[in-house]
Amino acid sequence: MGAAGALDPRRPNETLQRLLCGGGPGNASGWNRSLCDLLRSPPGPPPADLEFTVRVLLYALIFLLSVFGNSLIILVLVLNRRLRTVTNSFLLSLALSDLLLALCCMPFTLVPSLMGTFIFGPSVCKLVAYLMSISVSVSTFSLVAIAIERYSAICNPLQSRVWQTRSHAYRVIASTWLLSLLLMLPYAIFSTTVPTRPGLTQCQHRWPSQPFKQAWYILLLLILFFIPGMVMAVAYGLISRELYRGIRFEMDVKREATGLQHGSTEPLAPGMEDDGCYVQLARPGGALELSLLGRVGTGQQDRARVNSSQAMLLAKKRVIRMLIVIVVMFFLCWLPIFSANTWRAFAAASAQRALSGAPISFIHLLSYTSACTNPLIYCFMNRRFRSAFAATFACCRPRRPRLPPPDDDMPATGASLSKISYTTVSSLGPT
């Protein structure tokens, strides 16, 4: 046991501090006063500084990815006439709304959070709150429109071709923007700057009453999260089921073509009927029959059928995986923020204690992540879009790449009777 003031060799930092500083800042000489201050400071960055740095870096990363990715999508879709399809019209609207989300939401959420005050004034508060809500609404409605359009094109191809035109898509897009402009007017009306402490203000929503506030956030939870999420889940679930049935059909066709290569001309065995979700021709008496094209053909034709079948199988499997990713990402990005808003509407005190500061900031960041994941999922994972992107920026390349033929030009061989049913499969996902 040593004296209370004895130096402890097991703590070199404390020992050096006591030798130089003499136990207090007043005993330190001028030349080593700064060294004393350095020794007294705790090792490593303070937790608040670390959280500040991580928050700024994440916001900057998501902001740059969102602005860069969506700007590229807008540029490619506008400059390439061959990409002006029904689905891409909705993707263009989605990219515009995501770009608006990045530009109007992220800076005006991060800066007041870091400074502790809203420095932009009440007019900017109203405008930013209104544009934020419009961008979220249009983005959500665009995702729903894309899901419905894809479901109709794949599960009801004959009926959908009558109304799935670009003019119809433009009308739907205009309706989504107009509906969002009208629906989100309360944010422009009730948003204002509110003093929180002397010299500090925050941009907040001053609702007429507590019941109005609660009803409003429940309405948003339903029309911007729950109903769109269910529509997307059901639509993409039905598409996945249809594609899975198509995979089984393609496997049957592949076995049929393989049998023809070996000289087999036997009809399909009982229990191996062709899938009924493809093109069927009406026969007298109501009987439906699906005939394989070219049951007897040359060896070259049979090999082409097998190759086409394998390509279709891989494409459909990738599409199914991508559809699952779309639904999971939607719920992952938007569930926390809608849950937090509803919680604050019904239990403001407890929500404020639990969410203030870093938690609500990272919840907002998670919702903004959708603005940079949508371009990756819907566009950059698509082969035709990647080719169009390379063609658009071919000025930096020695030779201009040629766009692949439209998806509808897929050869209708015996391995794929999807000329009508699955013309949009390769435009849905990675190929």
Image (spheres, grey):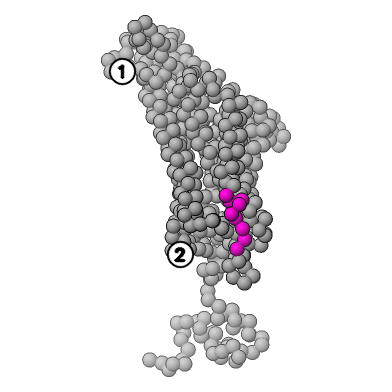
> The N terminus appears in which quarter of the rendering?
bottom left
Is disc 1 in contact with disc 2, using a CB cutoff of under 8 Å? Answer: no
The residue depicted at 64 percent of the width and 39 percent of the height is 72
Which residue is drawn at the image coordinates 66% and 87% (left, top)? 30
Q: Is residue 187 magenta?
A: yes
Query: Where in the figure is residue 263, as x and y percent of width and height?
Result: 36, 9
The numbered dot on residue 349 is: 2
Query: Is residue 380 in sight in this rendering?
Result: no
Instruction: Write down the region rendered in magenta.
Output: 186-194
Q: Nearer the viewer, mark 1 or mark 2?
A: 2
- Residue 156 in the image: state x and y as whole percent: 45, 23
Check disc 2 and give the amino acid type. Ala
Q: Secondary structure at mark 1?
A: loop
Q: Is residue 86 left or right of residue 238?
A: right
Distance in Å between CA atoms under marks 1 and 2: 63 Å
Residue for badge 1: 272
